[in-house]
Image (cartoon, coloured by chain):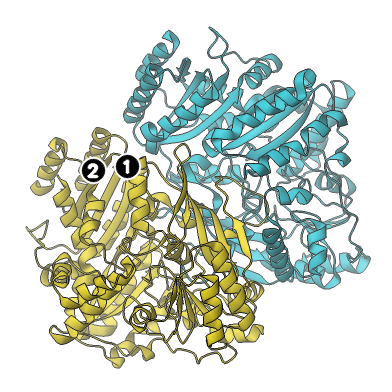
Chain colours: A yellow, B cyan
Amino acid sequence: MKYLTAASRLLRHSSRNLSNRRSNLQLLCSIRPSSSGHSYTSLRSYEKFMQDDCFHRNISAKNSFRGSVVGILNCLAKFQSGGIRTHHRNLASTASIPERNKSFATINSDDISYFNKVLGGRGVVQDEEKLDDANTDWMRKYKGSSKLMLQPRTTQEVSQILDYCNSRCLAVVPQGGNTSLVGGSIPVYDEVIINIGSMNNILSFDKVSGILVCEAGCILENLMSFLDNEGYIMPLDLGAKGSCQIGGNISTNAGGLRLLRYGSLHGSVLGLEVVLANGTVLDMLGTLRKDNTGYDLKHLFIGSEGSLGIVTKVSILTPPKLPSVNLAFLACEDYLSCQKILVEAKTKLGEILSAFEFLDINAMDLVLTQLDGLRDPLPSSKHNFYVLIETTGSMESHDKEKLEAFLAQAIESGLLTDGVVAQDINQASSFWRIREGVPEALLKAGATYKYDLSLPPEKMYNLVEEMRQRLGTAANVVAYGHLGDGNLHLNISTKQYDDNILAKIEPFVYEWTSKQRGSISAEHGIGLMKANKLHYSNSTEVVQVMAAIKKVLDPSGILNPYKVLPTSVLSSQS
Amino acid sequence: MKYLTAASRLLRHSSRNLSNRRSNLQLLCSIRPSSSGHSYTSLRSYEKFMQDDCFHRNISAKNSFRGSVVGILNCLAKFQSGGIRTHHRNLASTASIPERNKSFATINSDDISYFNKVLGGRGVVQDEEKLDDANTDWMRKYKGSSKLMLQPRTTQEVSQILDYCNSRCLAVVPQGGNTSLVGGSIPVYDEVIINIGSMNNILSFDKVSGILVCEAGCILENLMSFLDNEGYIMPLDLGAKGSCQIGGNISTNAGGLRLLRYGSLHGSVLGLEVVLANGTVLDMLGTLRKDNTGYDLKHLFIGSEGSLGIVTKVSILTPPKLPSVNLAFLACEDYLSCQKILVEAKTKLGEILSAFEFLDINAMDLVLTQLDGLRDPLPSSKHNFYVLIETTGSMESHDKEKLEAFLAQAIESGLLTDGVVAQDINQASSFWRIREGVPEALLKAGATYKYDLSLPPEKMYNLVEEMRQRLGTAANVVAYGHLGDGNLHLNISTKQYDDNILAKIEPFVYEWTSKQRGSISAEHGIGLMKANKLHYSNSTEVVQVMAAIKKVLDPSGILNPYKVLPTSVLSSQS
């Protein structure tokens, strides 16, 4: 307890501001997938690859930044399989991939000629190595066999491409940064890849309203840098921000670390420009905070994973950048205390609360065991649960006073057993590194069965305990996530993949989630991975309406086929 | 300027908390339409009606609360036409009502028998007086001729009613508190009224997450009272809260005074239960902050004004109630200063800013001239613009310090010319009464041409100035609204309605708004009033997709016909 008191003292006397903590941290570790809570290449590994031949080969191939990242990952895979341990799971057991839809045509030379004409000879990619990257997902779980990637530069080009593909019945897969964790952004068979990365212009920014308008291919981190200079921030922050694109973020309805404070993209996206399967351009690119003129169609495209249309331009409301950021790393002895602390934080910290994350003792142990250079911020004893609380506000002295008062009361009431407040940016980075290092630690520990669930907060940890009972000593059940949003990242870590263990996990985990009216995908989407599991979180009637809307907007089903909706439901609509 | 200094001193030394200001104010003036910025019956008028015979007659008729309110309004109309001045506009000139759709059946005795059976003999209303209320909109602009109102008590009953109406091709109009300002909640011809007001149970509230689940007929003010006891607030606050129902709020995508802080309903509504035209119940009543499992269909029903389905249950995220509220009434000499003050408030007040409203000198003059008992809070001189800034936070001393610092800098930089900070709840109420009294003052001044527009903030006031140039001395152009949200309430006040004046206003106002990519309905919706004006804020392609979705969900078009979408577009889908 004296540690916490000391930390409060440090907080009181600290003059260093943590506001740039996350951006600096990200510079070190920006090669990450599209959601917090998942693997990224550590700084140490990254440096190793920088010295690796194949990294430079990829760089010298003048790939896009995304291409480089994929290159690094390719190297990582090769490097791991060559030297360190590697774990490749037989994915067929978790995602039964449907057969190729025979109604889709295959690419011929006339098609290539047409696309060359539309794109003026640029951005018609048939190079095998580049296609290899674009055919492979970030997690290296899926691999498509597309023979063609198109890189349009304008909405008009996207429109012409889709109009043509629709008339020829050529299936397409829209691709941004290709950081999907559910196989949402790769071809399943030979779909034409439409990569939006060349549409990366910022079109306007209004300093009065904070409204940004840009093309869909803008990389999230670039938008963050741009806004930083304008005194604003993006309302979302993801681990993959160095690679992921805003169009992909919107198509996935990406969550991330700022959702607790700034809400979902359904609240902050003000307008979209979308190209439908038949090439029709829907101009819904309003820059208005309020607009009640008819059905708000843009919401259909937020989170529909490119299966209803391709997002080409985005208008988004950005919050002002506030100067004061604080971070506390706290310990609780039971899950109920974590919940109570959340309620207290919401009332006592109120308007300055900006993140509320948790990890359990298994997650903490794993990180400290597997990752180098990390130390326990609360070393005097082990605790069952750890909570990270971040505040962001406009006046540092006020925020610190609020945080101190909140912590003092939490200690007095017995909810907290220990804790420390970061006194500088380095300490804050090391705290975040523990929370964000869990996926990397899991990767190092062996095979992982990963689940991204939304559950009622009061029941969330029951699943973890039940899972431990089911699996006994056969696996290490590790829990962490965005407690403030009710989002649990449940990870089951084993030495190697084992279908007997899988059979004990699934469908149990989905059925349990479904019984609690939870979500089997809190922030990652459905993609290819969970298309046939959609019924666990949606009624038959709801799925049928989804399919009917797909049929209206994409009658031939050319947009991102085999994803999001179960193939059986789509067939029944024909 | 000394006034402001004095006010700051008052602020510093005031110990009275304003947190209950709005709720108390609302108790006095709760009979208001569905958006801030519109007429309500003043306390004085209300008291007069309390002594009026016909008010008591309506009360004694054991109407619902809503019924009583309409009763009061009926009395108001009669009272006004008998004694005080009254202004009835020939509405045919602004809303060309389409012919009755001949494909719709008319009610017969078998239908009545069926509905009596479904509803167990209760809630099948054929009484003329009750129907008269339900046929008439709040503004008394429209009057339908429905012969039947149904008052279901369960989702199952709504489903059975709709299934039957769909099979018989009986058109229906869903109705909540009937406070629509655009004729969205009344029958146009003989549609069956389905009033949801009897479905008014709170189903659950989670004190950890702040998630409320309730039936759609819950009156907004009742939900606010319930949450107040739980330490939470509703994320929306409207003038009509004493009458309007949460299902209607959601179907209108109601805006209001808290949108600046808590965002739109697209961000805070977590789940809905909706009954489709054919009786299918869509259970999307999730209570999860994050859920990315397929298309997020609930957004289609937020703001579609009951034309795609009837909302029967609601799950909504509610913010914690914060204890400190402050209100400043400020003066600026030009519109540019108002804009600059907004930017400053967003950065300096940051997380505690909860409202930013403005009114111009014409609005201020009108209020002070027309309404009794109000005095100018800044009496030393007249100013061109007035701004109300409200803060809401978790610690009073911090909020006051921030507000003082912000005001001091705004004065020093010359953006503010005068100002006062409310020192107690009475003063705060009197400040809000000025802003909220504008519509009532307009009503008293004569005829009003009302426009509810979203415009880019930097261009918003140009329209007001251009309108003044066009109209000269023929009319008083009055401007006020939610500047923080870019929402202008433009009102053109004349002695009486005159089609020559109207011709100078329309279509100019819509064309001007359209050129700026503004919205012709920021928060009121389209309803009957603007269905044929939808193209001013939406492209042909977008409207066609809206119509296609309407066709999928309501193939016979029985749900709220003649509203939202232009009849011509719907016909072309057949």
The residue nearer to you, when weighing B412 against A74, is A74
What amino acid type is highlighted by mark number 1? Lys
In the picture of the structure, the residue carrying the numbered disc 2 is A409
Dot 1: element? helix
The residue nearer to you, when weighing A120 against B539, is A120
Residue at left offset 21%, top offset 69%? A41
Residue at left offset 56%, top offset 27%? B358
Question: What chain does badge 2 belong to?
Answer: A
Tell me the crowding category of disc 2: few under 14, some 14 to 19, or many 20 or more residues within 10 angstroms, Cα based. Answer: some
The residue at the far left in this view is A380
The residue nearer to you, when weighing A211 against B265, is A211
Count of labels in the image: 2
Query: Image quadrant of residue A48?
Result: bottom left
| Side (left or right) of A447 relative to B419 | left
What amino acid type is highlighted by mark number 2? Gln
User: From what the image shows, is residue B168 above or below residue A392?
Assistant: below
* Residue A228 horizontal/vertical position (percent): 33, 45
Question: What chain does badge 1 belong to?
Answer: A
Residue at left offset 61%, top offset 64%? B273
Q: Earlier in the sequence, mark 2 or mark 1?
A: 1
Judge depth for marks 2 and 1 and give the one in front. Answer: 1
Same chain assignment for discs 2 and 1: yes
| Mark 2 and mark 1 residues within 8 Å of each other at the beta carbon | yes
Which numbered disc covers residue A468? none
In the picture of the structure, the residue carrying the numbered disc 1 is A348
* Residue A69 horizontal/vertical position (percent): 28, 70
Query: Image quadrant of residue B546?
Result: bottom right
Q: Is residue B40 visible?
A: no
User: From what the image shows, is residue B235 above or below residue A331?
Assistant: above
Query: Image quadrant of residue A471?
Result: bottom left
